């Protein structure tokens, strides 16, 4: 993992020097996703910076990604109201732009949030909707997150740590 962190640092530094904010913002989101479990404070800082850049630059997909991942971080921290606001922002941006490929990840985050709030029915609806999209679009990379979310809903236990 140290090699990946070093490469992220080099890439982010290069993008800053080059003034490529259009690439810096998604790079910060990617680095944040790699840090969410190990260093949530750094992940939050990267996501907040990416959100500022994306909002100022009109990079709406990156803005949606930042909100989605801020919501995931808030869920992990037990800050459910903050998570709900972030996920609502992500949903509004995704619906407005028509970028549907992030919808399964959004639905899975919403399912986790509902499960942790004790709303099993709504959590199951969101999980089913995510499963249908994943299957229809052959997004097999989300299978593990679907399985962990299902465990969380049905066991109402700790679930799995997901990014």
Image: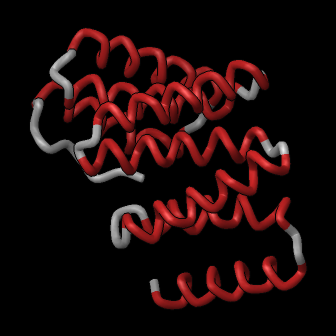
Q: Nearer the viewer, residue 148 or 158?
A: 158
Image location (x, y in percent) of residue 82? 37, 37
Q: Quadrant of the N terminus?
A: bottom left
Q: Is residue 2 above or below residue 27?
A: below
Say which residue appears at 51% left-offset and 35% top-offset: 105
Classify 100 as above or below 22.
above
Is 151 positioned to the left or the right of 1 in the image? left
Name the one closer to the observer, 68 or 142. Answer: 68
Q: Relative to residue 7, is residue 130 depicted above or below?
A: above
| Residue at horizontal 57 percent and vertical 68 percent from the top | 31
Residue at image location 78% in from the left, 25% down from the top? 97
The total number of labels drawn is 0
Nearer-the-camera pick, 91 or 1? 91
Q: Residue at x 23, y 26 (%)?
A: 115
The percent position of residue 138, horizontal first and vertical second, equals: 61, 32
Q: Is residue 124 left or right of residue 87?
A: left
Residue 46 lies in quadrant? bottom right
x, y (%) of residue 41? 39, 67
Rendered image coloring scheme: secondary structure
Is residue 37 toward the left or the right of residue 59 in the image?
A: left
Q: Where's residue 45, x and y in %?
A: 51, 65
């Amino acid at each position: 993992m140290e090699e990946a962190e070093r490469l992220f640092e080099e890439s982010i530094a290069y993008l800053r020097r080059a003034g490529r904010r259009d690439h810096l913002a998604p790079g910060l989101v990617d680095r944040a996703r790699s840090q969410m479990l190990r260093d949530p404070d750094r992940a939050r800082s990267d996501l907040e910076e990416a959100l500022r850049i994306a909002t100022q630059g009109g990079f709406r997909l990156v803005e949606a990604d930042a909100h989605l991942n801020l919501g995931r971080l808030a869920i992990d921290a037990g800050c459910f109201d903050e998570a709900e606001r972030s996920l609502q922002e992500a949903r509004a941006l995704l619906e407005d732009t028509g970028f549907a490929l992030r919808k399964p990840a959004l639905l899975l985050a919403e399912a986790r949030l509902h499960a942790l709030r004790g709303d099993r029915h709504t959590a199951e609806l969101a999980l089913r909707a995510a499963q249908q999209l994943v299957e229809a679009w052959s997004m097999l990379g989300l299978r593990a997150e679907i399985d962990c979310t299902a465990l969380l809903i049905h066991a109402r236990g700790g679930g799995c740590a997901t990014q």
